[in-house]
Amino acid sequence: MKVKHMKRLLALLAAVMLLMPVTAAFAAVDGFTSTYSYNYDYWGEVRESPDPYRVSQVIYSKDMDPSLALKAPKSLFVQGEDLYVVDSGNNRIIQLTRIDGKFEFVRIIDHVTAEADDLAVAEERYNAASDVLAAATAASESVEAVLEAPAESIAAAGAEKTGADQVLQKVQALEALTENWDYLSEGTRQALAEMTAAANKAVDQALAGYDAVAAAAAGDAMTGVIRVATDADLRVKAIVEAMTPLTAETISTDGALEAAQKSKAAAERAAEAVEALPAELGFDAALAAMDASAGAAAEVQKAASALKTAVEADAEALEKALQAEEAGFPEADESGSEPEEITEAKARIRKARAAAAAIVEAAGSVQSAADSLVKASGENRDCFADMVNAPAGMAEKVGLLEAAAEKAFADDCKVFAAESKIHLYTQWSPESEAEDAQVVSRLSTPGDVSVDEEGNIYVADTYNNRVVKMTKGCELIMEFIKPADNNFDQNQAFLPNKIVVDTSGRCFVLAMNINKGLVKFEANGVFTGFIGANQVNYNLWDYIWKTYFMTKEQRSQQAAFVPTEYQNIYIDKDDFIYATNIAFSEYDLLWDGAKPIRRLNAVGSDILIKNDRYPPIGDLDWVEGSSDHGPSKLYDITVLDNDIYVAIDHTRGRLFGYDPQGIMLWAFGTSGVPSEGAFNSAVSIEHIGSDLIVLDDLDCSITVFTPTDYGEMIYEASRLYLDGKYDESAAKWEEVLRDNANYNLAFIGIGRSKMRAEEYEEAMELFKMAHDRGNYGRAFRYYRKEWVEKNIWWVVLIILVLVAYTIIRKIIRKVKWEVQAYEHNKVAK
Amino acid sequence: MSTIKSLSSAARKDHPRLRRYKETLLYAKYVLFHPFDGFWDLIHEKRGSLAAANTFLVLFLMTYVLKLMYTSFQFITAPIQYINIYERCASLLLPFLILCLSNWSLSTLFDGKGRFKDIYMAMCYALVPYVIIQLPLILISNILAFDEGAFYYVLISFSEIWCLFLAFVGLMQVHDYGPGKTLIFIIATIFGALVIIFLLLVFFSLLSDAFGYFASLYREIVFRLS
């Protein structure tokens, strides 16, 4: 028995084993069918599809003007209708433009000129520096005024005092004159007395005023002001000193940055110092004294003028009396002899006249002294006001200086411009000068180009170790050079290979041999770090092997676990950077470890949406066994305006379009076959609208693809869906399905529309076709709910029937058992 | 009704083999819930039968196929259009048999009490939870929505864990080993299975080479003669 079973088992085993190859032969999936356009279905199988794109123009280098023939072109860039081809091997960039669907040659960009805008920048910098210098000079003056004001004020007070003294002296002199003069009227005498009193008072007041001013000038408040001003003076003088060479005609800007920074710092500190000025200086006493003194002076003036008038009146009266007396004299006879009394009288009259004139003169000088006293008093007031107001003036001027410095050095841009100008001059070789005086440097193996909205051109000028920004007319604006930052390995050359520029002018550079991510420059050229470093790629097994099973020598010979560089970058309209990566281990791809396409946000994290069964990696079928086998190497990527992104595969010359959800829309293209739409070595892709432009660096050709009706329909349908026009979108998808019955997105699109129309069963059917579990589940829930609502009576009925059946069965059994028991008992009896 | 009754009563009376078959089938219930006693008695008290074991294996394969075909697509990623039932069944059956064989080969050398038949039987009885849980689950999966999948997956995992546990206890009882030794032997069994597969591959490739040799010889002769 046992042996028999064993035999049977073995026979079964043998049968199954023989069956295996047979079934395997049936199950064998036929190989990769070579199609130009295709899609991958849910199972990762290739499904032929209609062509989404057709070739509309091919520009072969060999057909072009010999002077335009490309040599190792590296990259394409599109701005508006302009296409820039980076003709790296010829150290130039060729600009084409599309007119009526055909690309026409525009110009060659191969050099940078220094004139115009460079000078404009230099001029701007010069003007800014001049402004700073002027402001600094003004500030310096105001600071000096502050410093001198106390001394001046004291001098003015002294002058007033002297003036008062002089008035007094003059009055005393007048008094002395009038003492023995009999003609003085009572009024005049009184005026003279008043005048004397006023003069005395003025002298007293002037003395008091002087003391008050001297005290104020030497007081604590003023000392503080002086200290601040001395400090500010030093700084402002330093600024003047630093800025003077910057504004000189001969630009010796080695220390430009340093000077500018120093100036800025000095201006700031001066402003800070000035802010420390005492708000209230407390000069009330001095002002009151000065008011009193000025009042006294005014009185003196008034008194002096009154005195003068009085004296003059007296003199006039005297003159009249004298004339009357003279008129009474007899005519002189021929002999000329006069009577003695007449001669005496005449002499007396003369004397009286002279005395009167002297008195009038003295009164006049009193008045003029009084006038000058008033003037001195006024000056004293002014000087004091100057002293009081000078700190405020200084504060204002220093504030202006700071503002000017802030403006001039707000971004270090201008200073950098100055620096790049130096750089320019060092690049200036005699040959280029002889050839074209304007050319200051030529491009050297440019790797990439980018053009902003305003037409400024950014070139990754690889072997000049710079990214150069120039105007439309190739005039240098600035350069992004190797950052002098410790984060950047200073032993390594800066070899920018790819660049993108965001809408605010920030520049992201993919540099050769830099594996820390993209080098990020602010718009003013300042290096602000790396973003989006590629993760280190290794698996556990490698790690264990390397760590525990290799000798030190072996380890050192192996490449370290370092992050890899990106292959290419693209920036979309929302400033997200798309990066592609071709260095990965093949089998990381399918499990989404390699992430050959990334979408980097501002901090460099990958935020690419992947809602399909397979991540966006290009081909899923790697065509094992053919010459171009292996995973897709996505050399470049471009993002259309509708957020659909298209990557180009270098391995097999194919283009892959993905929608924003990461679902493959289509794939097409081929390599090897020398025909339109086939590539030898596709390296770059760009788009104008929905047209795609592909650059091949071996064929040196540029191929332009235009969407076919089918391709347009797909775009249109997804656009309508994004706009929320679900039913119109569904109608479009129906059209797509007519062309390609295997199009999952179409099923999903129509399914969604059906679900919105509450046709759940149809929606389920469609979602099932597209293998969209989430949506199917949603539709199914609704369907189930509807079904239960509709069939609830049947369900209840069936349950009731089942319950009833079991109860009845139990009863029947019980009755049977009772009958049997009864029978049994009967028999037993 | 009466005919069925008469048939079954006839089976009870007149066909002892049929009756035993039924009993051994129903014995699975005891094994499921009392694995230690159950497996011991299954082998040593002859409470199981090879026929019942074969039935369970077939049911297991059937469940598997039905699962592939009728589970709601929300819960299973089986490419229906590419499925080859024979291939799928073979890919389950062959490893199963090879593992049994490998276990038998090894345990025989290390004083395992079980014969091949015992091992096979225990393993087949251990597959029962798979059938009794996953068969209804096929129906249930069709009334569940995608986001209620947790329920489904928990039950699936539960059935699989139960099966593995039964297989473990089964081997323990069949060979009269301790748990540690059983574990070691399970690992050894897997390596043994790999060796067997390797030998089979070598055998088949040699066989095909030999066939190829004769085929080319034949072609050569035909070519020369013609």
Image (cartoon, coloured by chain):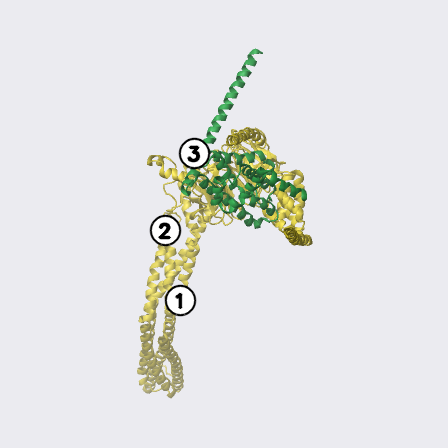
Chain colours: A yellow, B green
Query: What kind of element bears circle 3?
Result: helix
Q: Which residue position holds label 3?
A: B108
Dots 1 and 2 on the same chain: yes
Query: Among all residues in the image, which is located at the extreme bottom?
Result: A186
Query: What kind of element bears circle 1?
Result: helix
Query: Among all residues in the image, which is located at the extreme top?
Result: B225
Q: How far is mark 3 from mark 1, CA to CA?
A: 108 Å
Question: Which chain contains the residue that carries disc 2?
Answer: A
In this rendered view, identify the residue nearer to me: B76 or A631: B76
Q: Amino acid at mark 1?
A: Ala
Query: What kind of element bears circle 2?
Result: helix
Question: Which chain contains the residue that carries disc 3?
Answer: B
Residue A441 at what x, y percent from top left?
Answer: 44, 39
**Residue contact between numbered discs 3 and 1, judged by CB atoms under 8 Å:** no
In this rendered view, identify the residue nearer to me: A658 or A813: A813
> Which of label 2 and label 3 is nearer to you?
3
Dots 3 and 1 on the same chain: no
Residue A208 at what x, y percent from top left?
Answer: 32, 77
Q: Amino acid at mark 3?
A: Thr
Classify residue A480 by image quadrant. top left
Q: Which mark is residue B42?
A: none
Q: How far is mark 2 from mark 3, CA to CA?
A: 89 Å
Q: Amino acid at mark 2?
A: Glu
Q: Which residue position holds label 1?
A: A392
Q: Which image quadrant: the N terminus of chain B?
A: top right
Mark 3 residue crowding within 10 angstroms, few (<14) / some (14–19) / many (20+): some
Residue A289 at what x, y percent from top left?
Answer: 35, 77
Q: Is residue A519 visible?
A: yes
Q: Which image quadrant: the C terminus of chain B?
A: top right
Q: Which residue position holds label 2?
A: A258
Q: Is residue A589 visible?
A: no
Q: With respect to residue B87, does A199 lie above or below?
A: below
